[in-house]
Structure formats: C-alpha cells, structure tokens
C-alpha cells in the first residue's frame, strides 16, 4: 500500500492514494488554513468508520441478512496535550434492513472491532472504543424489482 502527500500551500495538502484517488486536507483558519478540506485527524475517524462499516455490511451479507444500509456516526475525544491522540471514541451503528437478527448485527460489530478492522486495532492502542447499535426495519424489495 502506498500514499503520497503533497503540500499545496499554507497548511493545505493533497493526499494521493496508491489506488489513484485524491483528497484535500486543510487546517482551520486559526491554524493558518482556509478550511477547504478535511483535517488529518478527521481522516483517521473517517478511515475507522469506513473500515468498520465495510466489515459489518460484508459480514451481514455473508450471513444472508437483508441489510440495506449501514451508517456509522462517530464522536471522539482527544488528549489535551501533544500528541493529541484520540482517548475515547464512540461509534454508533444504524443498520437498516428487513427482519435483521439483532444478535447477528451485534456479532458483526464485535467481529469488526475485535478481529477484522485494522483501523480499530490501531485506534484501540490509545482510545477507549465503544459501540452502540440501532436497527431500522425496511420493507423488503419485491422479487424482480430493483431498488
């Protein structure tokens, strides 16, 4: 895996992934930025949420659960002194589907957190991670219909 960070100006950087995608990172105005992109620490939280949501949806689909949506809302606290690492991270999963089995969803979240999500393993070195789940019932898609 490769990544490249290129300085644009002030505290703005262009991140380029080895897979050919780009993202702008910038600082807040009080740090010399123009607020034109993600903060680098926000990128870490996005990576954590994306990694876990990927795992959870894949596990549920492989378990033949009729999952139609998965949203992970994250709130984090950081240390007050440098390095300002994350100290607490609350992840709330809203999983939508038809007749979802709560125990299977809970197990998918647990497996992601404890076994599969590399980002969770890294973040757990400095932060207390906690997880909550809300299930939302959706109507099944009629056979032959497209969503």
Image (tube, rainbow, N blue to C red):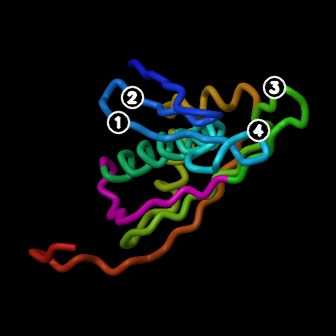
Q: State the SS at label 4.
A: strand
- Left or right: 144, with 25 as reference point: left
Task: Name the residue at 66% across, 31% down.
Answer: 123
Q: What element carries label 3?
A: loop
CB under 8 Å between callouts 3 and 1?
Answer: no
Q: Give the residue drawn at x 39%, y 37%.
A: 22
Q: Residue 144: name its quadrant.
A: bottom left
For label 3, the crowd category at 10 Å Cα-Cα, with few meaning under 14, some 14 to 19 and many 20 or more, is few
Secondary structure type for disc 2:
strand
Q: Residue 87 carries which label?
A: none
Q: In this view, does 81 lie to the left or right of 16?
A: right
Q: Position of residue 96 (x, y in %)?
A: 44, 68
> Circle 3 is placed at which residue position?
83
Cα distance in 3D space between marks 3 and 1:
28 Å
- Cα distance in 3D space between marks 2 and 4: 29 Å
User: How far from the left and from the top, in percent, is residue 83?
Assistant: 81, 25
Alpha carbon distance from label 3 to label 2: 25 Å
Residue at which label 1 appears:
21
According to the picture, the residue beneath numbered tag 4 turns out to be 128
Above or below: residue 74 compared with residue 128? below
- The residue range painted magenta reads 62-74
64 vs 52: above or below: below
User: Which residue is at the far top?
Assistant: 2
Position of 83 with respect to 97 (left or right) is right
């Amino acid at each position: 895996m490769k990544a490249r960070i290129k300085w644009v100006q002030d505290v703005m950087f262009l991140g380029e992934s080895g897979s050919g995608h780009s993202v702008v990172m910038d600082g807040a105005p009080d740090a010399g930025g123009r607020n034109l992109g993600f903060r680098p620490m926000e990128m870490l939280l996005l990576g954590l949420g994306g990694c876990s949501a990927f795992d959870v949806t894949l596990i549920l689909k492989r378990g033949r659960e009729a999952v139609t949506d998965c949203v992970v809302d994250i709130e984090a606290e950081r240390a007050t002194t440098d390095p300002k690492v994350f100290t607490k991270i609350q992840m709330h999963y809203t999983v939508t589907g038809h007749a979802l089995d709560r125990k299977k969803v809970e197990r998918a979240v647990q497996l992601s957190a404890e076994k599969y999500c590399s980002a969770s393993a890294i973040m757990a070195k400095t932060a207390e991670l906690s997880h909550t789940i809300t299930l939302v019932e959706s109507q099944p898609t009629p056979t032959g219909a497209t969503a």
